[in-house]
Image (cartoon, rainbow, N blue to C red):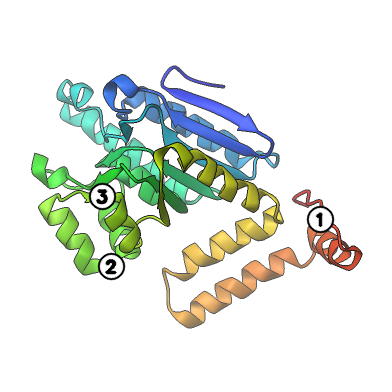
Amino acid sequence: MSHEGLRVEEDKQVCLLTLNRPEAMNALNMDLLLALREQVRSLRLRKDIRALIVTGAGERAFCAGADLKERAGMSQEQVKDYIHTIRDLFSAIEDLNKPVIAGINGVALGGGMELALACDIRFAAETATMGLTETKLAIIPGAGGTQRLPRIVGRSRAKEMILTGRRVDAAEAERIGLVTEACPWDALLARCRETADAIAENGPVAVEQAKFAIDKGLETDMNTGLAIESAAYWVTIPTEDRLEGLRAFREKRKPQYTGH
């Protein structure tokens, strides 16, 4: 169900979540965070949705981060609650049992960039700019930015970006591996959808286990990572989908996977 600040659209096996506060640069107020959290929790349990796309409404912003107007009126305890909520939400997005694609359609700053970092795949409009700019406000990234950015672009580059608060454009973001691809603004959602559809055609259990093996394996040494990969592989062995894949290959047709 859509929320005033969050538009929810489903097409076949793909769900599109659009941050819908263009008048506020799609900034994340508490209501929007709670709406996102509700959707992520719901999608985790749904077998009919196999991929998720997150983008922003309008041409200006993907997400400008925390709603600073709301933040200015918060007590210290309310700020702490906000930080716990956004950090836990982004971890839930990262750990979601299906791939999440960010369509960065404009400015992605602070918490907005941290939202993109929590996604599995990032595409950016050529007009987009990104940055973790919190140090300019005498704070630091608090929703995973200090941990996810260096794992994506490397320690030294992440430190330079975070400590200076510098923004990068889409071309640089693609060059340093922050986004998979920069594309024209009017082609962004189609590119996201193309990737989501390609994922949705594959075995859902296999996709889930591959994501799990990559994410958890990268957090450890090679031998442990290989053990994680093996354990994830064994999960796919008894599935009906594995047998369907073999039948479809033999019969030269497209497989019909059910997630069982």
Q: Reading the chain from its start, which is encountered first: label 1 or label 2?
A: 2
Q: Is residue 98 visible?
A: no
Residue 107 found in image quarter: top left
Sequence-first disc among 1 and 3: 3
Which residue, as the protein is rendered here, is positioned at the far right?
A: 251
Q: Nearer the viewer, mark 1 or mark 2?
A: 1
**Image position of 10 with respect to 228: above or below:** above
Q: Residue at x 23, y 51 (%)?
A: 168
Q: Is residue 170 left or right of residue 230?
A: left
Residue assigned mark 3: 169
Q: Position of residue 189 (x, y in %)?
A: 50, 39
Image position of 72 with respect to 80: above or below = above
Residue 237 visible, this orientation: yes
Tell us which disc is closer to us: 3 or 2.
3
Q: Pointer 1: residues within 10 angstroms few (<14), some, or many (20+)?
A: some
Q: Secondary structure at mark 3?
A: strand
Neighbor class of circle 2 (other Cα within 10 Å; few <14, some 14-19, many 20+) is some
Query: How far apart, in angstroms, are the residues tagged by discs 1 and 2?
Result: 39 Å
Query: Disc 3 or 2, which lies upstream in sequence?
Result: 2
Between the residue at mark 1 and the residue at mark 3, the CA separation in whole angstroms equals 40 Å
Asked whether disc 1 touches disc 2, contact meaning CB atoms under 8 Å apart, the reply is no
Q: Are marks 1 and 3 in contact (CB under 8 Å)?
A: no
Identity, as a three-letter code, of the amino acid under mark 1: Pro
Question: Relative to 188, does residue 251 appear above or below in the rendering?
Answer: below
On the picture, is 214 further left or further right than 153? right
Task: Give the residue number, with chain letter if any, for mark 2.
Answer: 154
State which mark lies toward you, 1 or 3: 3
Q: Amino acid at mark 2?
A: Gly
Distance from label 3 to label 2 (Cα)? 18 Å
Residue at 79%, 63% (x, y): give it: 242
Q: Residue at x 46, y 53 (%)?
A: 121
Residue 255, labelled with which disc? 1
